[in-house]
């Protein structure tokens, strides 16, 4: 009987991507098929995140539930991967001895061997090394699922912001060679993928080796991706203000496939806080990039991440962040209360701000960001948006769903055969989490004629 694999994924899109790769390697090596039910699984994997406290707490409660399954079926294998595994290593098995395998983000391609070892001797198997880019050389061909796909272009981070665990859990920045990335994208395009999301903790730090030994910059990568037949939409996550150079800004005038949406985290609007965070740029640097981007691509949606209540953040410094969001005018963004992470410098900073003050600040910021996001949604009513049709709407089987360039879900009446195509949709209604619209029939004819 086919053995089954259950994977629970926490954390960012890098982890989502890695979980898909775990599924692919174990299918290729052991014929494992994915199940959505942990009770049915022979192998259970938890892909963990340690960016904030809550993310880390989830680990032991999740594997604790799986222990009950193992009590009944002692042959099952439990593995913990991802960023908590990378940080904690063997300590995970000390606290949860029923965990068989501990592996890191850079060693998931070794899972087949780790699984064999665990099954052979049932000894505790740990591999959280950083063998650099080897991982990508040992992965099976990518499998497309629908018209959108993620492609990892670089791993790790070398910025060492004072609050952040990523450089410790994922290692230093390392880029995949240009040809490898393009080959993966070509393979996905042949399987019907139309939208690529380039992934990395700092994609614009991309420095990919080319066949002639030269190094490709991120903007050159964007040009290569745009040249792949069938790829009509390009996104990237996440970029950093420090290396957001003019050639990347120019790409917004040169590459129509680049979406009119940029997620560029600023974290804080206060220069003192930015410096304490060791972000390497000022508020003015950030505003200048945003100005240039708005000129290069009028109407672009801009979004950010924010950390509220960084150690020592004064009322006035928080107001600097509130003023910054007014100046930029953000679309849907993420904001978090500072979470001290063990092993990071900021965890040792003196932090006298009471939690309820931090919560009030977060609430104010989020309320204003939500208002701004809703205003953008409302301003889209009456406009015609290009939508990549993903599939049938979950709420109404007669409706299709897809996304606009600025990443809003749109539902509209249409034939299911439009899945995987770009169509024009007239926006008719803005709901809190999605839009409604009407298909522009002439945009469909275009597709049928060229098909
Ligand atoms: N590499 C990206 C973001 C990576 S982590 C960048 O530098 O922009 C995603 C987000 O989590 C960060 O942008 C930050 O807002 C948040 N974050 C990271 N560490 C945090 C911490 N210790 N406490 C609270 N939020 C944190
Ligand atoms: Fe973390 Fe900073 Fe690197 Fe982003 S740039 S992953 S916040 S260390
Ligand atoms: Fe979390 Fe690791 Fe991503 S800490 S946010 S899973 S890089």
Image (cartoon, grey):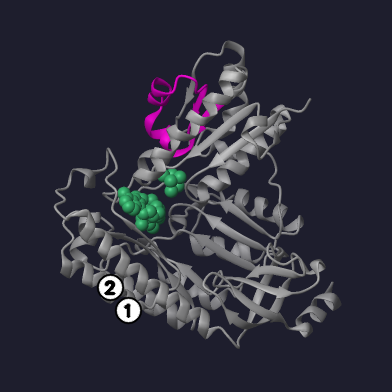
Pointer 1 residue: 326
**Hey, which quadrant is residue 136 in on the image?**
top right
Residue named by callout 2: 322
For image coordinates 41% across by 36% down, the residue present is: 84
264 or 223, nearer to the observer: 264
Residue 449's place in the image compared with 65, above or below, is below
Left or right of 324 on screen, residue 290 = right
Residue 40 pos. (x, y %): 67, 30
198 above or below 397? above
* Vertical comparison of 216 with 157: above or below: below
Image spot of residue 221 (x, y percent): 55, 60
| Residue 438 image offset from top left, x and y in percent | 70, 81
**Picture residue at 43% right of the left edge, 22% below the top:** 93
Residue 226: percent from the left, percent from the top? Answer: 63, 66
Which residues lie in the magenta part? 78-104
Query: Secondary structure under badge 2?
Result: helix
Q: Residue furthest bottom?
A: 382
Tell me the element at label 1: helix
Q: Are marks 2 and 1 in contact (CB under 8 Å)?
A: yes
């Amino acid at each position: 009987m086919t053995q089954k694999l259950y994977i629970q994924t926490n954390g960012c899109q890098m982890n989502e991507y890695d979980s898909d790769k775990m599924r692919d390697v174990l299918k290729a090596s052991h014929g494992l098929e994915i199940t959505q039910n942990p009770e049915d699984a022979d192998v259970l994997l938890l892909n963990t995140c340690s960016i904030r406290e809550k993310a880390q707490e989830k680990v032991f409660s999740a594997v604790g539930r799986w222990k009950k399954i193992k009590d009944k079926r002692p042959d099952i294998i439990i593995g913990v991967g991802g960023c908590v595994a990378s940080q904690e290593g063997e300590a995970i098995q000390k606290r949860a001895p029923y965990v068989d395998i501990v592996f890191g983000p850079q060693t998931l391609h070794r899972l087949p061997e780790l699984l064999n070892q665990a099954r052979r001797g049932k000894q505790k198997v740990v591999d959280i090394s950083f063998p650099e880019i080897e991982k990508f050389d040992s992965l099976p061909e990518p499998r497309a699922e629908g018209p959108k796909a993620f492609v990892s272009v670089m791993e790790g981070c070398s910025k060492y912001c004072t609050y952040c665990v990523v450089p410790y859990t994922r290692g230093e920045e390392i880029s995949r060679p240009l040809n490898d990335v393009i080959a993966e994208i070509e393979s996905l395009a042949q399987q019907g993928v139309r939208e690529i999301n380039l992934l990395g903790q700092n994609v614009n730090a991309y420095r990919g080796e080319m066949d002639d030994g030269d190094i490709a910059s991120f903007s050159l990568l964007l040009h290569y991706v745009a040249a792949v037949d069938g790829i009509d939409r390009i996104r990237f996550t996440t970029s950093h203000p420090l290396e957001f150079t003019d050639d990347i800004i120019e790409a917004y005038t040169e590459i129509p496939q680049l979406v009119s949406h940029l997620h560029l985290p600023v974290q804080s609007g206060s220069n003192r806080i930015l410096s304490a965070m060791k972000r390497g740029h000022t508020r003015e640097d950030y505003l200048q990039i945003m100005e240039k981007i708005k000129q290069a691509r009028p109407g672009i949606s801009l979004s950010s991440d924010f950390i509220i209540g960084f150690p020592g953040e004064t009322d006035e410094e928080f107001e600097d962040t509130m003023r910054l969001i007014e100046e930029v005018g953000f679309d849907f963004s993420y904001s978090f209360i500072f979470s001290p992470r063990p092993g990071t410098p900021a965890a040792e900073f003196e932090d006298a701000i009471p939690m309820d003050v931090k919560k009030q600040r977060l609430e104010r910021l989020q309320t204003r960001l939500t208002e701004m996001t809703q205003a953008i949604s409302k301003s889209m009513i009456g406009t015609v948006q290009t939508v990549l049709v993903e599939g049938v709407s979950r709420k109404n089987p007669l409706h299709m769903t897809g996304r606009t360039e600025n990443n809003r879900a749109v539902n509209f009446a249409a034939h299911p055969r439009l899945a995987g195509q770009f169509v024009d949709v007239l926006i008719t209604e803005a709901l809190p989490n999605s839009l409604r619209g009407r298909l522009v029939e002439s945009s469909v004819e275009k597709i049928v004629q060229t098909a």
